[in-house]
């Protein structure tokens, strides 16, 4: 069964951000590694080991492949229509949110900050 739900991809994004902060030294490691271990279901010692990778991408790839929660599964052809409907719903939701943020501005000239962005 494929698990590409928006909630799981969102969770993966949060986990990737935390791992990147730990990897770059910008986050308190012990607490964050323990939290990441709980969320990813990968032992904290294993996460510490994979952080020794040469790049963040390598560390993330290893965490993703070891985690039953983060592992990417292939989409089965028979599931494709349902996956596409779910993707369309996500895109429609993002479009609605974007419309609320821009409040109907359709061109840069319609933007309330247009004057500040123009060069003299």
Image: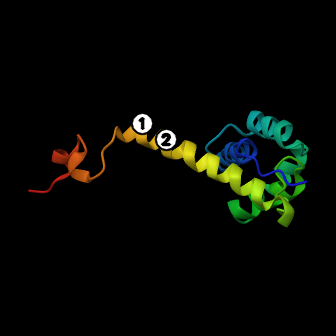
The CA distance from mark 2 to mark 1 is 6 Å
Pick the residue in front: 5 or 44: 5
Local secondary structure at mark 1: helix
Pick the residue in front: 118 or 79: 79
State which quadrant residue 52 falls in: bottom right
Q: Is residue 84 above or below residue 99?
A: below
The answer to whether residue 67 is left or right of residue 29 is right
Q: Residue at x 89, y 55 (%)?
A: 66
The reply to whether residue 102 is visible in this rendering is yes
Local secondary structure at mark 2: helix
The answer to whether residue 58 is left or right of residue 110 is right
Q: What x and y, as percent, mark residue 70? A: 82, 50
Q: What x and y, as percent, mark residue 92? A: 56, 47
Q: What x and y, as percent, mark residue 54? A: 72, 66
Q: Residue at x 15, y 46 (%)?
A: 115
Q: Residues within 10 Å of mark 2 (few under 14, many from 20)?
A: few
Pick out the residue farthest to the left. 120
Q: Residues within 10 Å of mark 1 (few under 14, many from 20)?
A: few
Q: Residue at x 54, y 45 (%)?
A: 94
Q: Is residue 27 above or below residue 109?
A: above
Q: Is residue 56 above or below residue 12?
A: below
The reply to whether residue 76 is visible in this rendering is no
| Total number of numbered discs in the rendering | 2
Q: Which residue is mark 2?
A: 96
Instruction: Identify the image quadrant of the C terminus.
Output: bottom left
Q: Which residue is mark 1?
A: 100
Query: Answer yes or no: do the residues labelled 2 and 1 have beta carbons within 8 Å?
Result: yes
């Amino acid at each position: 069964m494929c698990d590409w739900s928006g909630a799981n991809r969102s969770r993966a994004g949060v986990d990737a951000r935390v791992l990147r902060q730990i990897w770059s030294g910008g986050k308190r490691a012990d607490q964050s590694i323990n939290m990441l271990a709980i969320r990813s279901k990968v032992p904290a010692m294993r996460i510490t080991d994979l952080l020794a990778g040469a790049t963040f991408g390598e560390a993330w790839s290893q965490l993703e492949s070891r985690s039953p929660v983060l592992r990417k599964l292939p989409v089965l052809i028979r599931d494709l229509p349902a996956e596409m409907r779910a993707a369309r719903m996500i895109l429609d939701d993002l479009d609605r949110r974007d419309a609320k943020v821009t409040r109907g501005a359709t061109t840069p000239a319609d933007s309330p900050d247009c004057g500040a962005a123009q060069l003299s």
